[in-house]
Amino acid sequence: MKFYADRVPVALRQLITDILVVLWVYLWIRVAFWIHDMVEKLAVPGQKLEGAGSGIADNLADAGNKVGDVPVVGDDLTEPFTKAADAARAIADAGRQQQEFVDQLALVLPLVAIAVPLALVLFLWLPLRLRWIRRAGVAAAVRDDPAGRDLLALRALAGRPLNELAKLGPDIAQSWRAGDAEAVDALAALELRQLGLRGSRR
């Protein structure tokens, strides 16, 4: 397996690209955490609302219990305190619901923020990088073998632009078909150079 090219300019470009991709992913992870923290701050009013509502409800319930001990009219006096305590509990519930909504938002928004950058890396950059690693690994493994050089030459004939092939001579295809070693080596070197690899040791 070959991760970087043999030729310095290509290898340097690959290394810089890899570093930039890692920094890109790290940056978006940091952004996602920042969004999470900012959204979580929106839960503070809900926490205060819940705390205040629960506190008022408890105080009103205690007051209602004490008033309920008054003989004869105790039950009648308790009813307004009970209703007020129920209203305060409704306020506390609203605060809890607001916190739950904020928690969900704090989970969803960072995921949305990081989904697109990660998708670009996973579906655009990574397949291209893996394809090069696979192709370069195979090419490096076969470049010193005569049959391997012939395969590389065939690959160059099939895939390289005509202007590049024409620079090797007008009869390069015929020379390859005839088994001319120099033509095979020139075509193989062209394919290896396109991958950023050095030529064969032959």
Image (spheres, grey):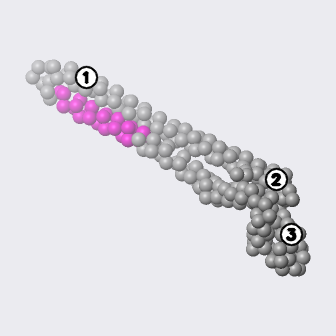
Residue type highlighted by circle 1: Asp
Could you tell me which residue is drawn at 35 percent across and 35 percent down? 92
Q: Is residue 190 visible?
A: no
Residue type at the position of mark 2: Asp
Q: Which mark is residue 40?
A: none
Q: Main secondary structure of the magenta part?
A: helix
Q: Which residue is mark 3?
A: 181
Disc 3 element: helix
Quarter assignment of residue 166: bottom right
Give the amino acid at mark 3.
Answer: Ala
* Position of residue 85 measured from the top left corner of the image (x, y, whole percent): 27, 31
Q: Earlier in the sequence, mark 3 or mark 1?
A: 1
Q: Which residues are magenta?
A: 77-99
Count residues near mark 2 (Cα–Cα under 10 Å), then give few for <14, some for 14-19, many for 20+.
some
- Circle 2 residue: 6
- Does residue 19 sit above or below 70 in this rendering? below
Give how far apart the Cα atoms at labels 2 and 1 are. 81 Å
Question: Residue 110 at x, y = what percent?
Answer: 54, 46
Q: Residues within 10 Å of mark 3 (few under 14, many from 20)?
A: some
The correct choice, above or below, for 145 with respect to 97 in the image is: below
Pick whichever, 181 or 192, lies toward us.
181
Instruction: Determine the CA span between mark 2 and mark 3.
Output: 23 Å
Q: From the viewer's perspective, is residue 169 above or below residue 100?
A: below
Q: Which residue is mark 1?
A: 62
Q: Taking 42 as reference, is 29 left or right?
A: right
Q: Position of residue 120 (x, y in %)?
A: 63, 56
